[in-house]
Image (spheres, rainbow, N blue to C red):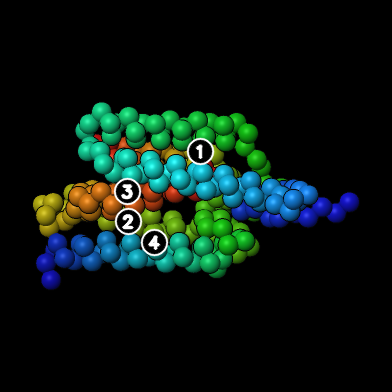
């Protein structure tokens, strides 16, 4: 196995883990009233600076991928 | 008078609006708004997917979404709702924890840094490399734009 294929495999595993978490959250196993990201919402509401930081990271990702 | 309440994800209890006479109630308005927002998001993603990075069109479209997000963030912080007394103030809720997301994010960030500094790009592809491979197809790029918009929506709700 080359480094390239190993790296792709790790990224695929991380992507799969993300999908699993989203599905679990959407199915209500990790959230309230079947809403995804409920625990994340609670954290962001409790810590406004974290919310600003997270939205900034989201904005940076969009700019990096789609504009630059 | 006992009005029905529903528990929202942010730990805030809101009164449920009573249904109107035609039976549609507030739910119909919310569904209609979601459909409208979804349509706009799909159209936006389709247009952005046809642009190329480092062009004025890509800059303008992406900046437009960022401007909307910034406005929503400012309004959201200014009218911030607080958790009721006794409600959890951190990521812990009755049915879940933010810990899995934090762990996933930390592992992904560590792996990205390792790939970024670890060696030649072909052998250690970063997220940007993967994106460049996938974004060759406009349909895939449109899906990625939609995923980005959905994440932004979730973060701002």
* 3D distance between C-alphas at marks 4 and 1: 24 Å
For image coordinates 52% across by 48% down, the residue present is B35
Q: Chain of mark 2?
A: B
Q: Quarter-wise, where is residue B97 in the image?
A: bottom right
Establish whether labels 3 and 2 are both on one chain.
Answer: yes
Q: Chain of mark 1?
A: A
Q: Nearer the viewer, residue B59 or A51?
A: B59
User: Which SS class for mark 4?
Assistant: helix
Circles 3, 4 touching at the beta carbon (< 8 Å): no
- In the rendered image, residue B142, in percent from the top left (x then y), is placed at 32, 48
Circles 2, 1 touching at the beta carbon (< 8 Å): no
Circles 4, 2 touching at the beta carbon (< 8 Å): no
Badge 4 local density, few (<14 within 10 Å), some, or many (20+)? some
The residue identified by callout 3 is B142
- In the rendered image, residue A53, in percent from the top left (x then y), is placed at 44, 39
The residue identified by callout 2 is B108
Q: Is residue B30 among the parts visible in the rendering?
A: yes
- In the rendered image, residue B48, in percent from the top left (x then y), is placed at 31, 40
Q: Quarter-wise, where is residue A3 in the image?
A: bottom left
Query: Which mark sits nearer the N-terminus, 4 or 1?
Result: 4
Circles 4, 1 touching at the beta carbon (< 8 Å): no
Establish whether labels 3 and 1 are both on one chain.
Answer: no
- In the rendered image, residue B64, in percent from the top left (x then y), is placed at 39, 31
User: Which SS class for mark 3?
Assistant: helix
The residue identified by callout 1 is A49
Establish whether labels 3 and 4 are both on one chain.
Answer: no
The residue identified by callout 4 is A18
Quarter of the image where the N terminus of chain A is located: bottom left
Pair 3/1: label in front: 3
Badge 1 local density, few (<14 within 10 Å), some, or many (20+)? few
């Amino acid at each position: 196995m080359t480094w390239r294929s190993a790296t792709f495999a790790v990224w695929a595993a991380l992507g799969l883990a993300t999908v699993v978490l989203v599905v679990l959250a959407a199915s209500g196993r990790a959230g309230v009233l079947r809403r995804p990201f409920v625990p994340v919402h609670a954290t962001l509401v409790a810590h406004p600076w974290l919310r600003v930081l997270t939205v900034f990271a989201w904005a940076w990702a969009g700019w990096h991928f789609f504009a630059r | 008078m006992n009005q029905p309440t529903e528990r929202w994800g942010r730990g805030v209890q809101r009164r449920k609006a009573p249904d109107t006479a035609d039976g549609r109630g507030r739910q119909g308005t919310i569904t209609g708004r979601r459909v409208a927002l979804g349509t706009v998001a799909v159209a936006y993603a389709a247009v952005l997917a046809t642009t190329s990075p480092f062009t004025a069109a890509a800059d303008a479209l992406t900046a437009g979404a960022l401007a909307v997000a910034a406005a929503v963030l400012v309004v959201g912080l200014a009218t911030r709702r607080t958790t009721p007394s006794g409600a959890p103030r951190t990521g812990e809720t009755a049915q879940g924890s933010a810990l899995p997301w934090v762990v996933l994010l930390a592992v992904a960030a560590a792996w990205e840094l390792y790939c970024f500094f670890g060696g030649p790009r072909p052998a250690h592809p970063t997220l940007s490399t993967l994106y460049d491979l996938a974004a060759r197809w406009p349909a895939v790029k449109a899906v990625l734009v939609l995923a980005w918009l959905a994440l932004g929506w979730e973060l701002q709700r």
